């Protein structure tokens, strides 16, 4: 699952995006929280001469591509996300519930649906040590599988390496 922050970076990586779309081993999943955050991008923001918001939404839709790969945010996911934050605060985490809410909803959705990895550019919040430990501790309590937490740069390096080794073709 790609965090909302990743889509803003992927607009600069067309070769990698095409590789992800064509490679069946990379099934990108999303959730309503991610799409809502992308919809919240102001309409007037431009990238080059294009409006960023519709570009981000189109990118999200093309990568997620199927309704069954978009998860709803259920009461259970909300409960798990609140528990992440409670544990995060107990560990001395400094961000508020409001600041971390969407990050924890995304991670809870990924955990509940057994996603392999969560990729984010948010190194200090979503991928911060206390947040990751809080999620792992809570997932253990709820008997959920932990996704691997991966920084965007590391994920993109792997994608570019795979893209090169396959000659740009899916394998």
Image (cartoon, rainbow, N blue to C red):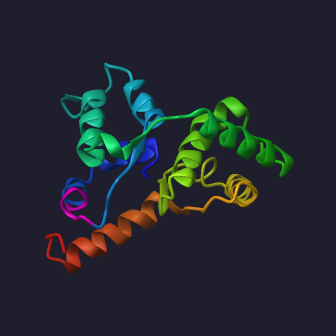
Left or right: residue 121 versus residue 52 is right
Dividing the picture into quadrants, the one containing residue 152 is: bottom left
Residue 146: give x, y in percent of width and height: 60, 62
Residue 108: give x, y in percent of width and height: 59, 47
Dividing the picture into quadrants, the one containing residue 76 is: top right
Residue 62: give x, y in percent of width and height: 23, 44
Left or right: residue 145 versus residue 44 is right
Give the residue at x 72% y 59%. 133
Dividing the picture into quadrants, the one containing residue 165 is: bottom left
Residue 7: give x, y in percent of width and height: 36, 44
Give the residue at x 45% y 30%. 37
Query: In the figure, 27 relative to 83: above or below?
Result: below
Give the residue at x 57% y 48%. 107
Quadrant placement of the C terminus: bottom left
Left or right: residue 17 versus residue 129 is left
Left or right: residue 86 versus residue 147 is right
Task: Specify start and end residues of the magenta stretch as a single range.
Answer: 19-24
């Amino acid at each position: 699952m790609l965090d909302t922050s990743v889509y803003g970076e992927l607009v600069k990586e067309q070769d990698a995006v095409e590789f992800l779309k064509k490679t069946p081993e990379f099934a990108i999943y999303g959730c309503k929280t991610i799409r809502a955050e992308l919809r919240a991008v102001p309409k007037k923001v431009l990238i080059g001469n294009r409006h960023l918001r519709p570009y981000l939404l189109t990118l999200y839709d093309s990568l997620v591509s199927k309704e069954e790969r978009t998860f709803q945010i259920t009461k259970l996911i909300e409960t798990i996300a609140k528990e992440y934050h409670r544990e995060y605060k107990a560990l001395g985490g400094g961000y508020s519930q409001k600041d971390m809410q969407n990050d924890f909803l995304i991670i809870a959705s990924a955990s509940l649906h057994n996603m392999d990895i969560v990729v984010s550019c948010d190194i200090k919040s979503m991928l911060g040590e206390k947040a990751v430990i809080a999620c792992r501790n809570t997932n253990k309590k709820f008997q959920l599988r932990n996704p691997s937490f991966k920084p965007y740069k590391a994920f993109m390096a792997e994608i570019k390496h795979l893209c090169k080794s396959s000659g740009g073709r899916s394998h």
